[in-house]
Image (spheres, grey):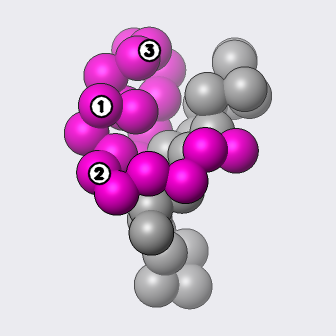
Amino acid sequence: MKVRCSLKSAKARDKDCKVVRRKGRVYVINKKKPKLKARQG
């Protein structure tokens, strides 16, 4: 999982990427390509 300052670029990598908020953190998740996961902060 990548840790990034901004998730805008992480979301743009694949059309299946979703931005979700969990426990105050922002994540990018992708069910089809799990290696594209990212977390903000």
Indicate the amino acid at tag 2: Ser
Mark 3 or 2: the one toward you: 2
Above or below, 34 against 22 in this view is above
Magenta segment: does it hold 12? Answer: yes
* Residue found at x 25% / y 39%: 8
Q: Which mark is residue 9?
A: 1
Between discs 1 and 3, the one toward the N terminus: 1
Magenta segment boundaries in residue numbering: 1-20
Indicate the amino acid at tag 3: Asp
Q: Position of residue 32 (x, y in %)?
A: 69, 17
Above or below, 22 against 33 in this view is below
Q: Which mark is residue 6?
A: 2
> Is residue 10 in view from this perspective?
yes
Mark 3–mark 2 distance (CA, rounded to whole Å): 16 Å
Q: Position of residue 6 (x, y in %)?
A: 29, 51
As helix, strand or loop, the secondary structure at mark 1 comes to helix
Magenta segment: does it hold 29? Answer: no
> Are the residues flagged by discs 2 and 1 in contact, CB closer than 8 Å?
yes
* Residue found at x 69% / y 18%: 33
As helix, strand or loop, the secondary structure at mark 2 comes to loop
| 11 displayed left or right of 3 | left
Q: Residue furthest bottom?
A: 23
Mark 1 or 3: the one toward you: 1
Q: Looking at the figure, which quarter contains the C terminus?
A: bottom left
Choose top left, top right, bottom left or bottom right for residue 23. Answer: bottom right
Indicate the amino acid at tag 1: Ser
- How packed mark 1 is, by other alpha carbons closer than 10 Å (few <14, some 14-19, many 20 or more), is few
User: Which residue is disc 3 drawn over?
Assistant: 14
* Residue found at x 31% / y 22%: 12
